[in-house]
Image (tube, grey):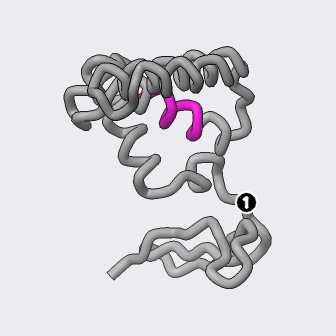
Amino acid sequence: MRKEVISKCPVCSEELTISRLHCDNCGIEISGEFALTKLAKLSKEQLMFIEIFLKNQGSIKSVEKDMNISYPTVKKMLNEILAVLGYDKLEEDKVSIQRQEILERLASKEISFEEATALLKKL
């Protein structure tokens, strides 16, 4: 049974490197220091999200429906994945998502109008 490659050390949480490769067909083994790809740095949940995102050809609406999550949650997950992959996201996008999340919490009556106003002023 094959195991999935992990990218973080279970002891210290630092990034791991691959030191040996093996071909099941001819038996050759190659030793060295091999880096993991950027995608190997993503968690299982993030990889599942990327798979659903690609299956839906980047349609955020379709991802929302498939995963039963809100637009701000989709955007938040995308931004987290972009950060793990080393791509900087604009600060105004983060503020926009936070604003949308506050408005959704207000609409679902999780927070009061006063609480929403105070949270929006902090942004």
Percent x, y of residue 17 = 72, 69
Classify the position of the N terminus by image quarter: bottom left
* 79 magenta-colored: yes
Where 115 sits versus 19, above or below? above
Query: Magenta region: which residues?
Result: 74-81
Say if the magenta span includes residue 87.
no
Crowding around mark 1 (Cα neighbors within 10 Å: few <14, some 14 to 19, many 20+) is few
Front-most of residues 16 and 76: 76
Find disc 1 in the rendering and name its residue: 35
Compare residues 108 and 16 and report the one nearer the observer.
108
Amino acid beneath label 1: Ala
Q: Residue furthest front?
A: 114
Left or right: residue 52 compared with residue 103: left
Work out whether residue 122 or residue 37 is closer to the camera in this orientation and state it: 122
Residue 107 location in percent, x, y?
30, 20
The quadrant of the image that shows the C terminus is top right
